[in-house]
Image: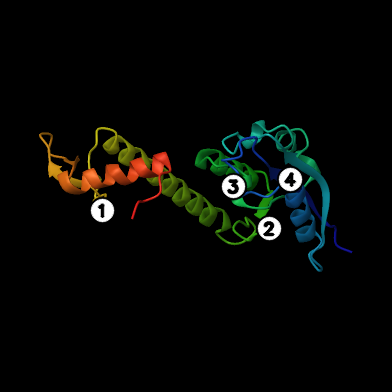
Amino acid sequence: MHNKVRVVGCGRKSATRTEDENSLSISAQKRDLQYWADTPGQNRIVIGWALDTNTSGTTNPFKREQLGPRLTDRMDEWDVLAFPRIDQISRKVRYFSELLDWVEDNGKHSVTVDGSLNTQAAGGSAVAKVSVLAEEEHREIRKNVTTGMQTLREPGRFTGGPQPFGYLSIDSDDEHRILTPEPLYAELLREIAGRVRDRNPRTP
């Protein structure tokens, strides 16, 4: 009989709701990990858990309360680290890459039960690193675009697209277009806004 593959089920949940608003609860992560480990014919056994609560995705995995010891003093107890998804490993590319390099250097493996990472597969580690890097760049681009749009809006600069009702976009001295009230419709807009604010019904 073959020795069973020893699995540590790993999960993470941040204390910040906005960071993990689409993430599963710790109990749901544990359920999915156990279901994956129990898949018939895979010869796996969960020998322990590293379920870190109140832990940001930017925390170094080696410094996590539950996971950290599994990577140092207790590394001889297991063969595979299993995570529900890649973002439960780390949201920082550097930390993610460091963990995968460590796993490879120490003859271990890491997988995600959603199939996005499997270091046992040929090129699995490299593919995952590229995927995480691309996601990080996409997140940074969205952040920069949002910040840039906000910076433009603050002095009343026009950021493009359809002009708001009651305004015109005109050239300014600093080579940007700005919004200025359109005489006729701006007055109408103020009247409508006043009625809504005062909750006055429109008179026939």
List the residue tagged with mark 1: 161
Q: Mark on residue 173?
A: none
Label 4, residues with CA under 10 Å away: few <14, some 14-19, many ≥20? some
Real-space CA distance between mark 3 and mark 1, rounded to the nearest whole angstrom: 34 Å
Query: What type is the residue that disc 1 sits on?
Result: Gly
Q: Residue at x 23, y 51 (%)?
A: 163
- State the mark number for residue 113: 2
Disc 3 residue type? Asp
Callout 3 secondary element: helix
What's the CA distance linking mark 2 and mark 1? 42 Å
- Mark 3 crowdedness (10 Å alpha carbons): few <14, some 14-19, many ≥20: some
Relative depth, front residue between 61 and 152: 152
In this rendering, which labeled residue sits more in front, label 2 or label 4?
Answer: 4
What SS does tag 2 mark? loop
> Which mark is drawn over residue 26?
4
Q: Pick whichever, 16 or 136, lies toward us.
A: 16
- Do labels 2 and 4 touch, CB within 8 Å? no
